[in-house]
Amino acid sequence: MIYYFTFNDQPSGIYESQVLDTLEFLRKSTSVEIRLIAFIPKANFERNKAKILQKEPEAIVLKMIFGISRWKWHLPMLKWQLRNNVEKIICRGPLATVLAMDAGIEKVIYDGRAAVKAEVEEYDVTMGNIKLGQDFIRSEKRAVLESTYRLAVSQKLVDYWKNEFAFKNDSYVIIPCTLNNSWFEQSFEEIRKNHGNVKLVYSGGTGPWQSFELVVKMLRKWLKDHENGEVLFMTRENVLIDELISEFPERVERKFVGHEEVKKELSSCDYGILIREDRVTNQVASPVKFAEYLSAGLKILISEGIGDYSELTHQLNCGQIIFNEIPRLTSVDQAENIRMKSLCSEYFRKEKYKEEYNRLIRI
């Protein structure tokens, strides 16, 4: 039995695609037994537990009764759950990895998703909690240097490990954020056929690391300069979006839909937005939205230096690198729409990385 361990993650579209879909893929593509153990925050615990169990009925879902600041106090709970000679555990993030190592698990795999030290220093992700920020930074260093094996979402993340922590060995695999088969089985061509103007979409959160103020600033100028432009925000309510809708009521809208409805909404658009500030946090990223946009036939508007993906955008001719402003754009025709979907299938199916996943399972 292999365990996949998440700590302080709540159910969301990202959690579903990066955790739950991956577990489903591993079961189908390998003979391994794998079980999720999730420590989730106290807020909305029962509701979020039910969401996880709906897709993972055998999951162990536990309440973080001591909160994130006292994260180490959850170690006895983890030891008790893993008391029956667990040989291997895949851990999402540095805190989960350190807890698993301190629990005495023989083989601990660090699932590295971000440059955590950079997130703390650049975006204060611990919201002023200096001690917790220091814990994050120390835990990332331990996870990188002391884990048995590592999964990185980009080569740029591995380069960051080498520069920041003097990481030197080759015990890692690179697996970008990928999509499940269900994404490729959905088709919404009829929505594209009925669309006229050039329509941009922003799908994702509005956290500081997602550079949302910069995105809105660029979109406001683009809407003023291009009368045939439309924008769809697929995110929760935000005052900046409300202001933009007030300025362009017929051309800007906001929707927030479930994970299973995302592709349908994306399919009504021409370009997906991945505009970020030039920070280390973004330089190592692997935004799952890149694959989601392509899967719906969209071209990408991406900042320079976003993980491995700005360069990939240029190599595949699947969008434009954005510097100071969004240029004049033309609607994506059917041939290009089909080509984008084909590129997504070629580069971002989980099956493409089956050997990398098997390597994790075999260590």
Image: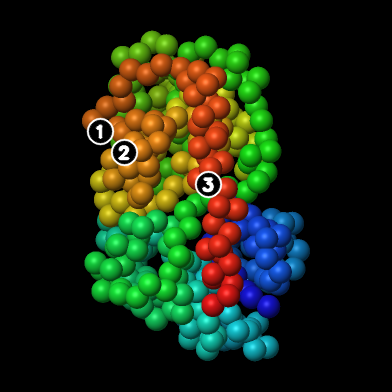
**Which mark is first along the chain, 1 or 3?**
1
Tell me the residue that label 3 is attached to. 348
Does 151 sit above or below residue 244? below
Residue highlighted by disc 1 = 323
Q: Mark 2 — residue?
A: 303
What colouring style does the render use? rainbow
Task: Give the residue type that dot 1 points to.
Answer: Phe
| Residue nearest the viewer, comparing 273 with 342 | 342
Left or right of residue 120: residue 39: right
Q: Position of residue 340 (x, y in %)?
A: 50, 32
Assign a secondary structure to mark 1.
Answer: loop
Q: CA distance from mark 2 to mark 3?
A: 20 Å
Could you tell which of marks 2 and 3 lies nearer the N-terminus? 2
Q: Residues within 10 Å of mark 1 (few under 14, many from 20)?
A: few
Q: Nearer the viewer, residue 27 or 98?
A: 27
In which quarter of the view is residue 145 placed? bottom left
Q: Looking at the picture, how far across and down is residue 307, in whole percent?
A: 35, 50
Q: Is residue 275 visible?
A: no
* Mark nearer the N terminus (2 vs 1): 2
